[in-house]
Image (cartoon, helix red, strand yellow):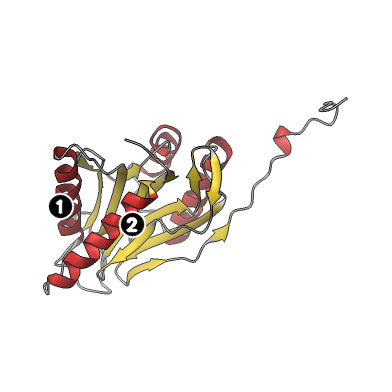
Amino acid sequence: MRNFVTGTSVVSFKYKDGIIMGADTRGSYGRLAKYSGIQRMFKFGDKTLIGISGEVSDMQYLVKTLNILTEEDNRGIDPKGYHKIIQRILYSARSRISPLNLSVCVGGINAGHERGCAISNEKKMLGCVNHLGNFYFSDVICTGIGSYIALPFLRSKVEGREDEITREEATSLIEETMRILCYRDCNASNEIQIGYADSQGVHISDPYPLETNWDIGIREDEIVIE
């Protein structure tokens, strides 16, 4: 697969009130930070939040296809339905030997939940589909290089506490995870968006910058150019 402009990791996990997801807004051309302000999280319906990492043009194609399918179907599609549709699209592309270079994180509140009521863990849905159409479900999901760097950190903080973590703590954890990725992934940016899927619906924040501290990389006695 040839890549041109790509987006890096998406991180997500279940918390007390629903699903939280985070992603940065950088589009990289190889190792060049070519574009900023690229949205990689999307709201579908009233209960589904989707985050995508990988080739930006493939992401645009997938989002366009999902919008068309949503307009054609008068029935409401829940998160599991979107997850299955995305899995079929990616598996079909892979079977035609022209895979879409994407990893897609799908989260939300499944059908049968009444708006404003407390959400059981069974109603929270969080799944991932990769470029081959392979998929899985988990309480904590990271895509891209985040599956190596961020996933162990989030599992240590979240697993076993999904029904205890408040929205404020979840937001703080996502910000800390995105800060870790910014420090360690050369394609990551400190401009991020955070998305929530809970009993009130789906909300995606406007992009905002994380505070970072690079003092650890500075040596006062270091001579760069003589």
Q: Give yes or no for contact between labels 2 and 1 (Cβ–Cβ under 8 Å).
A: no
Answer with left or right where residue 113 lies relative to residue 5.
Answer: left
Number of the front mark, 2 or 1: 2
For label 1, the crowd category at 10 Å Cα-Cα, with few meaning under 14, some 14 to 19 and many 20 or more, is: some
Q: Nearer the viewer, residue 223 or 89?
A: 89
In the image, which disc is placed on residue 93? none
Q: Position of residue 112 (x, y in %)?
A: 14, 67
Q: Nearer the viewer, residue 21 or 8?
A: 8
| Among the two numbered marks 2 and 1 on one chain, the one whose residue lies closer to the N terminus | 2
Q: Nearer the viewer, residue 49 or 60?
A: 60
| Secondary structure state at the residue bearing disc 2 | helix
Q: Position of residue 182 (x, y in %)?
A: 55, 43
Answer with left or right where residue 106 lies relative to residue 88.
Answer: right
Q: Quadrant of residue 109?
A: bottom left
Number of numbered discs overlaid on the protein picture:
2
- The residue identified by callout 1 is 84
Quarter of the picture containing the C terminus is: top right
Point 24% across, 66% down: residue: 67
- The residue identified by callout 2 is 60
Point 71% across, 34% down: residue: 216
Q: Quadrant of residue 75?
A: bottom left
Residue found farthest to the right: 226
Quarter of the picture containing the N terminus is: top left
Residue 182: in sight, yes or no? yes
Q: Position of residue 52 (x, y in %)?
A: 35, 50
User: Distance from label 2 to label 1 (Cα)?
Assistant: 18 Å
Residue 7: in sight, yes or no? no
Relative vertical location of residue 69 with respect to residue 33 in this rendering, above or below? below
Q: Position of residue 134 (x, y in %)?
A: 19, 38
- Amino acid residing under circle 2: Gln
